[in-house]
Image (spheres, rainbow, N blue to C red):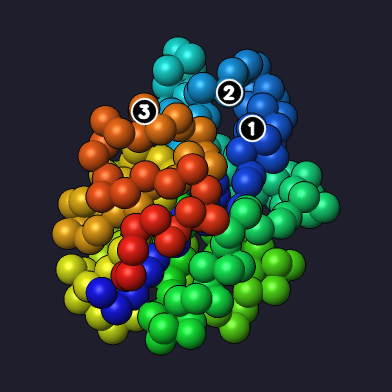
Amino acid sequence: MRAVIFDKDGVLIETFDSYFQSYTKVLSRIGIKIIANDIAKRYGMKGPEIIKQIVNEKGKIIADEQVKELANEKDKLYMKISEKKLKLLPGVKKLLTYLKKKNYKIGIASSSSKEIIEKMIKVTKIENYIDAIVDGFEVKYSKPDPEIFLKCAEKLKVKPESCFVIEDSFHGINAAKKAGMKSIAVTTGQHTREELKKMKPDWILNTLEEFNKIGEL
């Protein structure tokens, strides 16, 4: 194995509350009320797709242009809400340091925008660890499609079968498996260990502080 690809939300940082607040405010402007599960079950998808699905589910119809505008508003709100909350989850910095020492290539593949990913990297001071980034707008299809992970492997210049993916969501684990990559699931996102087991990842960790449990990579 030569590379490790991280999802961002729920893996590197905890962002669900900030995302939920921003989606709630944006969708309320078009008369839609949501609950946490409306977002949780779509975690890992692109913002425009999440909004479009929720709008359709609630029985409304809006133009694609308005979906795009709402998604952009959501991103701006999220960045404002999360600005003072951005911090790495337990075990992340230690794992990144270990991987660099072992000469692993490190990528981030997240459905967030490039602006949001780059801000997170800068605020948490992990720029020197990251070798490649693929954001949700560089790919045509959202997770569970494997495109985002395959593109990240391409940027890292490694074969898909030489990659580990660290994910917290059903969509992400499914995408990793479709990409032919090994998957490590963590329970620091919105799913329990029992729920994640159903996706049959190669390993399940409570936090990345337990990464030593998978043995030598």
Dot 3 surroundings within 10 Å: few (below 14), some, or many (20 or more)?
Answer: few
Q: Is residue 76 left or right of residue 112?
A: right
Q: Quadrant of residue 162?
A: bottom left
The numbered dot on residue 36 is 2
The answer to whether the residue labelled 2 contacts the one labelled 1, judged by CB atoms less than 8 Å apart, is yes
Quarter in which the N terminus is drawn:
bottom left
- Vertical placement of 146 versus 64: above or below? below
Q: Position of residue 131 (x, y in %)?
A: 46, 81
Name the N-terminal-most of marks 2 and 1: 1
Three-letter amino acid code at the position of disc 1: Phe
The numbered dot on residue 195 is 3
Kindly state the secondary structure of the residue where label 1 is placed: helix
Q: What is the number of callouts on the image?
A: 3
**Residue behind mark 1:** 20
Quarter in which the C terminus is drawn:
bottom left
The answer to whether the residue labelled 3 contacts the one labelled 2, judged by CB atoms less than 8 Å apart, is no
Q: Position of residue 151 (x, y in %)?
A: 30, 69
The answer to whether the residue labelled 1 contacts the one labelled 3, judged by CB atoms less than 8 Å apart, is no
Q: Position of residue 8 (x, y in %)?
A: 52, 56
Name the N-terminal-most of marks 1 and 3: 1
Q: Residue at x 34, y 41 (%)?
A: 171
Three-letter amino acid code at the position of disc 3: Glu
Q: Residue at x 33, y 70 (%)?
A: 216
Q: Confirm whether residue 20 shows in the render.
A: yes
Q: Residue at x 61, y 38 (%)?
A: 16
Q: Position of residue 154 (x, y in %)?
A: 28, 77
